[in-house]
Amino acid sequence: MAGKFDNKCTLHNDYDYRFICSDCRVPVCDYCIVSKNHHRSHSIDFITSENCNQIFQEFKNNNFQFLIKCLDGDKELLNKSNEIFNELEEEHIHNVNTISNEFKQLHTILDSVEKDTIKHLVSHYDENKETHSKISKKLENNSKNAHLITNKYKDTINNFNIQQIFNNDQNIKGNNHQHLELLKHCHQSQMLVKEKNTENKNIDLLNEFNKVTIENSMDFVKNSIKDTFKIKLSSATYKDPKRVKLGGGEYFIYKDGCVIPNGTLYLALGPSIKNLTIGSIPATIQRIALLNGFNLQLTEGLLPNSVQWLHIGAIRKPLIKKSIPQSVSFLFLLDGFNQEISEIPPNVTQIYLGDTSFKIPQTLIKSVRVYKTPSCKQDLNGFNEVLWNSNGYSQIEM
């Protein structure tokens, strides 16, 4: 039984191939012939063994071999695409985690500032509340005494005979000492009148209040927060350099499982490295550069003790104890470095600082010479401090 073959036109799936375009040397369908975008006005022939053979020989000798190469090329392209995307995915996860952690800290700070500010407002309010209560009680007491005195004497004050009251034996010898009560009320009245007539007394009372206002800078803060992180796009074109230039020297870029050429003294470790074991880097290497994005946790012995110069960019992992070889004398902490360093080897005599948030311990500042770029923020109080222009060190990335 004969097999079923695919005779449909590649460009017009509803039509079968029926002719050959002699000008283009390709099979055509009816639609191809009448279409102005394809083969209209071309020379059209019937399909024969002769013209079929010509097309087949070109397919066999040229196009078929090229298709095989295309498949290999597509496979290589896919591998490169996967490599780029994996790095971009790691970068994305790192960026998201960075932003999340920073904003968590910001939320904590904002919450603390909010509570502290409200606490101060409540404290000032309580002070004003206490002042209000003191004034109210004082006025209430004064009013009570004034009413008591005025009500008691409003109908009789003009009829009092002080001498008669004083000489009255009943008042003096008995329990009803009217003259003493009268003296008391005279004294109370005297104090009330004196208080009311004292200049600025009422103003002084009211001045005990403190008006509370707030200076609102939140618009500035909000706008500043919006600019805290800026997303920038740049080409992620695949690059596969063998070497990278840094500070005037050329560093061979190490990759997983690669063979380091004999005589190599300068080595760069980039973000593509997934596996590194003790002995992977030969003990002949004198200088190592950890490029931006390097994401492997270094431990003791991974970097050989032959390394004297160590350049560190914006790496992703902290430098734990003994991860920096004891042989290092010159330590470069370049732009973007923001990790912790658990231990700086005692043999380090010079430290070079770029735009980094890392702070050199004060105990170490006096024992090393520090070279700073103008962008370095740390104040070293003048100890062994030298200005460094950092030419050739602005970027350490692939």
Image (cartoon, grey):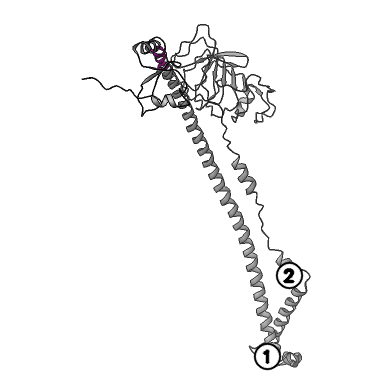
From the image, tell me which residue sits under label 1.
171
Which-is-in-front pick, marks 2 and 1? Answer: 2
Q: Nearer the viewer, residue 69 or 12?
A: 12
For the stretch drawn in magenta, what is the main secondary structure?
helix
Question: Where residue 208 sits: x, y (%)?
Answer: 69, 63
Left-right relation of 203 to 334: right
Count residues near mark 2 (Cα–Cα under 10 Å), then give few for <14, some for 14-19, many for 20+: few
SS at circle 1: helix
Q: Is residue 346 visible?
A: no
- Front-most of residues 89 and 361: 89
Report the magenta residues as a range. Answer: 59-72
Q: Quadrant of the N terminus?
A: top left
Residue at 35% x, 24% y is 16
Residue 175, position in %: x, y?
63, 88
Which residue is depicted at the point 44% across and 24% down?
82
Q: Is residue 209 left or right of residue 31?
A: right
Residue 293, percent from left and from top: 52, 25
Q: Residue furthest top?
A: 262
**Does residue 196 appear left or right of residue 122 in this picture?**
right
- Asked whether residue 67 is drawn in magenta, I would say yes
The quadrant holding residue 355 is top right
Which amino acid does the dot numbered 1 rest on? Asn
Residue 305 sits above or below residue 211 on the image: above
Is any atom of residue 123 visible in this view? yes
Query: Nearest the camera: 268 or 54?
Result: 54
Secondary structure category for the residue under label 2: helix
Instruction: Determine crowd level at label 1: few under 14, some 14-19, many 20+ residues with C-alpha closer than 10 A.
Output: some
Q: Which mark is residue 202?
A: 2
Query: Quick one: quadrant of the C terminus?
Result: top right
Task: Specify the label residue 387 is tagged with.
Answer: none
Q: How far apart, in angstroms, are the residues tagged by discs 2 and 1? A: 40 Å
